[in-house]
Structures are given as C-alpha cells and as structure tokens.
Image: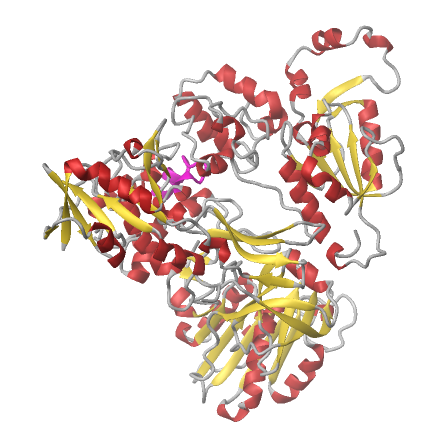
Amino acid sequence: MSSLQLFKKKEEKKPKVAIHSITGCAGCQLVVYFIRDKLLELLGEIDLVAAPMIKGKNYSGQYDICFVEGMVANKRDFEHLKKWREQSKYLVAWGTCATHGNVPSIKIYKDKNEVENVVYKDKNNLGGGSEPVKPTPIEKHVKVDYSISGCPPEEIEFLRMMQHFLVGMKPTVYNEPVCVECTLREVNCLLDNGKECLGPMIRGGCNALCPAANHSCTGCHGPIEHANISQTLKLLANNGVSKELVKQRLQKYAGLKFEELGAILK
Amino acid sequence: MKSIYQAKRYKIKDIQRQSNNNIMLRIKTKINPSPGQFVEVSIPGIGESPISTASYNKKILDLNVQVVGNVTEALAKMRIGQKIHLRGPYGTSYPLEQLKGENLILVAGGCGVAPLRAVIEYLKERRLDYKEIHLFFGFRSPKDILFKEEMKEWKSLYHLNLSVDKAPEENPFNCPVGFVTQILEEADISADNSSILLCGPPVMMDKSITILENKGFSTDKMWISLERHMKCSTGKCGHCMVNGKYLCIDGPVFRYDKVKGIDE
Amino acid sequence: MGRVLKKEDYKNFLIKFKNAGELIAPVKTDMLRFQKIEDVEDIKLEGNPFFPLKKFFLPNEEILLKIRNGLTKELKRKKSFFSNEKKKIIFGAKLCDINGLSILDKLFLDHEYPDEAYKYRRENIIVVGVNCLTPPSQHCFCSSMDLKKESYDLLLHERENDYYIDVLSETGKKLVKYLPEENFDYPLPETRKKLDKKNLWPFFADNYWENDSEQCVSCQRCTILCPTCFCFDMFDNINPSTRNGNRKRKIDSCHSKDFTKVAGGHVFRDTRLKQYRHRVLHKVQFFEDKFKRSMCTGCGRCIEHCHSKIDFVKTINEDFK
C-alpha cells in the first residue's frame, strides 16, 4: 500500500492480501473465514488474491499483506515461507503456531524418534521436502512484521489489524496480560483462589474467555514480553501447583519463548 | 455544554517540506496560541497527536510536523486544500511579557526550534522591548535544518548561532560542525539580566543547562519545554503526568527550577 | 438534618427506589458485585463490592465523538451517547467509594475543562450510601484517610432499632421527605489498619520501592479496581468500508508497559519500579501536593486484590523512616 488508503482515488488498487498456511491445524484460517458479519464487507476493501483453502485460483505475484498460519515442521514449509516473505510487503504471523510454535513444538521436549515413529509409517521414505526438521515458529526463519498469537486467534484482532492497514496506520496489537480484561469483566480471580491460572504472564486479547468460564488460563496466547515470570511462578508455587504441571502448561503453547524468558530450563 | 474533546475542521492552506521527515502545515484558523503552546491535531479514523505551534500570527497557524507516528505519517500524505481537525491551544507558554527589557537566549535542537520560531515571530513585532537576542540552534546535518529561508532573516536581525552535528555533504549555511552545546559553551554570553528559553531533546537540554549554570545563569531564569504524549490535553487522561505535574496543563513550558531533578 | 427509617420499613424503602429507576446494588454470588436489582432481597451490604463505584461514572470504555465518513469529513459529539442512559439509583456504596467520586470531581468537573459525560452522570445518578459499622476487610484503612461526609445524596447508618438517613442533596431530600426528621452525627468506621501519612519526597530514591515492585506482575488490577484511578486512553475506531466509527476512550493504567510511550517508541517509565512508585506517589503525595487531599480513600482493594499482596501501606508505615 503506497498511499494512505482512505485518501485513495477510486481507481487506485485495493491492497492484495494473502492467507497462507504451513504445518498446523488450519483453525486460524477458519477464524477468518468464519467472520460472518464483517467478512463480505471487508472483501470489498481488499483483494484476497491468495487463499488456497477457499480459492482454486491463487495469485503468486506480490502481496501487500500476507497472513501465515502454522509453523515450520519440515523443509517444504521453510521453502514456502521463504517465498511468501519475498512476495510480501508485510508478513503477519497469524496464530500461536506461527508466533510461538504451539502444540507441534512439544516435540522438542520428547524423544524425536519416538514421536516420528508414531506419526510416520515409513520415516525414511518421505521425500518431497516432507522430512521433519526441528519444529519452530516462523520468526525463527524469516522477518515477521506483525504477530497475532492465539489458539485460535481472535477475529476481532484480525479485523482491528485490517482496519489499521486499511487506514494506513501501523497496526497495534493488544499487549496487556489476561488479568486486565479478566478484572474488567469482574471475574473472581482464579489465581487468588488457589488455582493454576497463568493469566499475569499471558497476552490477553481473548477477553478472558477461559477464566470467565471458571477455567484457568493455560496460556494459548503465549507470554507478554514484559511479564514478571519469576514472580508469577512463585505465585503458582504458593498455590501448591506442581512444577511439573506448570512446565507442561508452558511447553504446550510457547515452550521456546518461555525458555528464552528463563521460565523453564532447557 | 460543549464536549472538551470536540475538534474543529480547518483547511490546509499550504504545505512546506522542511527536511526529510519534517513538514510545515499552514492552516487557516482563528486559533491563536501563545508561543510555547500546543494543539491537538487529528484525523478522524487515525487519531490525535499533540503538535507544538510554530507561529505567532492572527490568521495562519503554522505547525511543524516531524513524521514519527501514525497521525504524523498521515499528515505528511495530505495535500493542500484538504482538511484536518484541531483543538486547543493547550498548555503554558514562554512568559515573554514578563521578560521585557531583558536579554534573551534561545537554545534549541532539531524540531525543538519550531516552538521557538513562534517566540521569534512574537519578538519581531516587539523587537524594541527586548535587549540582545541570541539564538543557538543545532541540527543533525545541513539537510535537516528547518526554516531555511527564515534563518537568513534571523541572521540579520539577531545573533544567530547555527550548528550541525555533522556535515557529510555540502554545508550551504557554512555553519560550524559540532553539537549546539559546544557552541553554547564557547559563546560570549552574560548571565546579567538574561533569560534562557530552551526546547529540544532531553539530553541536549540537560547538557545546555549544565553549561549555562557554569556560566552563572540561575535556574529561575531558564524556561524549558518538556515532551510527553498528551492524549486528552485537558489534565485528565494521566499519560503526560510526571511527578504530579500534568505537562498538558501545568506545562509544557516550565521554569526550570520548578522541575529541576524530576525523575520518573 | 437527616431522617429516620424503621427497620421494618427498610424493604419498602428499597422497593420505592426500584420503582423510581434502575436500582443498582451489591449482590453476592461468588463474590460481591454491583448489579441491577430485580428483587430487593438480593441486596447484600456486608463487604465492599469487587469493582468500585467509579464504573457507573467513568465506564471502562465509552464513545466520545462520532466519526462520519472518515478522515477529514466529520467529527461530531452526540449528547445521546450518555443522555439516553436510564436513570440510575445506586444503593449500598461505601463511603470510601463515594469519597472516590469527590476525588474524580476535582479532575472531571474542573472549571476549565469539565467532562461532559461525567458531569451528566454525576448530576443524574442518585447515590445512596451505606455506612460501614465494622470495616468490611482487614485491608481497609479508611479511618486514616480523612473521609468526608460528601458526594452522596443519601447515606444509611444502621442503629440498633432503626436506620438514620443522612441527607445531602435536594434530590435525596425528595426521596425521603415522607420519613420523620432527626439530627444525628453518624460515626465513621474505625479501621485497625492505618496509613501513617508522611511526606514521601525524601524517600523517592529509597530501596523499598524496589522490594515491592519486584513482586509486581504488572496485572494492573490495583489501578482497575481503585475507586479513584481514572487514567484513560483515546483511540479511533472506524469501519474501513463505511468509514464511519467513533473516537473512544478506554480505561488505561500507569502499570501498563506502553503507558508513557511517545511517538518514535521511547518509553519514559520503563521499569516496574518507576511504574509502581508513580502509582503510589500519585495516590498519596502528588495529589495531596496539588489539592491538599489524599487521592487514596483507604478502601484497600489494591492490596486485597493484588496477586502478590503488595502492601504499600505497610511499606510506608514500616520502611520509610
């Protein structure tokens, strides 16, 4: 997008948007296609040039914005990702697989062969770039302009980002812990009541979906960068939550990031 | 009752490119701020941004916009004849009335020169009310010098000391290369019956103040302008508060001894 | 001059309120919250509601201006944003929350820049307080915060055989004019915990700030639940295709990382220590310097609901010497 979109003349082109996917469950893409009430309107403002999940004919030239879901689990993923990066002005990591590795990267903490033997019938004969590599989020491989985490991510965050792009702003992504929205919803604090809620160190944006349903936050959005990890772990320990459970929870969605932040030992 | 957040729409009369990332918007408006005050400029749909006023003129308001954020980037894409929203003016101003009969020393760096341009326009109309007027303006490089045309005029009317941090290419103003603080250090200025008006990056202001204090200037003769992101500009939202002082209503211009040593 | 309400008339007294408008009062489910009342039997007065009174006057998010046909076209204020709100009567607020309104009045009703929506709500929402006989929480320290008998329309004080109703406003007077008059100076609650008020400027660089802030997890509960924390963010929200939308404000917190961010990315209060110190000093020093009154009303929520139970009262009392 060269000029501010809202000043655009009628004949100026709409931004070319792509939604691509590598290894993952495709649930993040579905979030976008399920935005029933606003999707058609949004499609009037953008040119959805590539969305293999819902389109047969996909453009492979330059994109203005490319949303990528999933994480790099094999060589082919990496090749695709590299290509999309070259094609795109802005690359957005869409969903926790793309931003933090998510469930697929639990493999890192297991015995590699054991996992691969369960998944593949004949590991030695995969071919076509399907040979497994260390499962990692896309920011480990290419430059990511913006990240929206979530398993799945929230549609409101997608719409907000598109709104910002369309008016010519640098998108801002919600960057407060789960506790903020949880408190605003007047939820009875689970952490204060002895539960294993990870709220204080996890990025919100979900409007405290789980705590409001009396379910501890398990951290599907991954950590906020400025989280006070050591104190949150202390609070969990004070609640009698076992170290093993905390470790499992942290490894489930964003193990690599929590390792970097020193929350779990390598 | 009127909403204090309501902004009014005004037409852009002229846009002057000042440097790579500075533009000056000239706006036809009845808003007539005192030198040092600021206005909230907004583009509905994008947001608001506090911009210091760079003129003292009854009919045209000049705003020097440094392109750093969303609103300023959008402003940079606007064309003559388009409209923007303004509310204000807000905040305190340099107490020029009170400084009559004194020598004035204006020290600024980068886009900090903009609010002092308003001071200069004010002084121009009342030149005889003041004694010697020294200007110490520093920019990053010759390309970054703002108000290039006016600098020539200022040079003839006042003691202009223009400097650039570095001059990798040509240096059309032939100004000395070095920090403005160095020029200030070497300058022959007397603390006697003099007041200082400062505006610029925090590091530059701190250093200038130390130099001036060594030269015998007292802190109650220095007026500085501080920067924060004012969001409501009416002393409410809390974003610009530093140690109990709202920069939007108690500032942005402070007598230095009132804010000396304030820490976050 | 106040009024007297017999205990047996208490229920009818509340039903009268319910018929006069939308009655809001504390209700206990898993915890105590201000809620719209369907049955006056649900009202529970023991304890202090989780979320303070301020939300009815400064909602967590509200529309300030309407944007029509985006960008340069129109930015309009609409009175209907707030004036369509139903007439509310809030019953059961405690004096600490009510004093919180006095604090907010100082900022939002100031002469130069009065806030339209806040002013409207202050004039139209009826506040009926209830005096605490015993402090509802061990963290309460209001008796050291000079609470004033102000900013409510009516206030109930329970006595052995009846309620004494303190009347402050004309609106309040109309609501209770059928009750017999009495003159009585009701006592304020006495809390065990007290804040030892002192000049905190000499302790600005003290290490104890660090001890406390190291335990802070930046969850912002202290500011969200404070009856006097008012900071807000302003932002625009428009529909990209219709270009219509709103300029809104939303509750913000000085404990948020981006609170002091300026264009270009610099953050002025970039550490938890600076953020924590700013909050505490704003409550008990900065506001006091300016308005000769502490901004803290001693409700104790910021301590009670802190994940780490950071107690600034204890720090000030015991460590700043």
Q: Nearer the viewer, residue A96 or C319?
A: A96
Above/below status of B157 relative to C139? below
Residue C217: say if magenta: yes
On the question of residue C32 being in view, the answer is: yes
Which residue is found at the position 35% from the left and 45% from the top?
Answer: C53
Residue A4 falls left or right of residue A177: right
Query: Can residue C318 be seen by looking at this rendering?
Result: no
Query: Where is residue B39 drawn, in percent x and y?
Result: 55, 68
Q: Within the image, what quadrant is residue C111 found in? A: bottom left
Apparent side of residue A231 relative to residue C281 in the rendered image (left or right): right
Identify which residue is drawn at 28% across, 51% down.
C99
Residue C171 falls left or right of residue C230: left
What is the x, y in percent for residue A61? 89, 41
Nearest the eye: C321 or C178: C178
Which residue occupies the extreme bottom position in the image?
Answer: B128
Q: Quadrant of the N terminus of chain C?
A: bottom left
Disc count in the image?
Answer: 0
Colouring used for the render: secondary structure
Q: Quadrant of residue B150?
A: bottom right
Whether residue A33 appears in magenta in the rendering, the answer is no
The residue nearer to you, when weighing B169 against B63, is B63
Residue A92, compared with residue B94, is above or below; it is above
What residue do we see at 54% from left, 51% from top?
C267
Q: Position of residue A208 (x, y in %)?
A: 51, 32
The segment highlighted magenta reads C206-222
Say if A160 sits above or below C293 in the image.
Answer: above
Q: Position of residue C56 (x, y in %)?
A: 39, 47
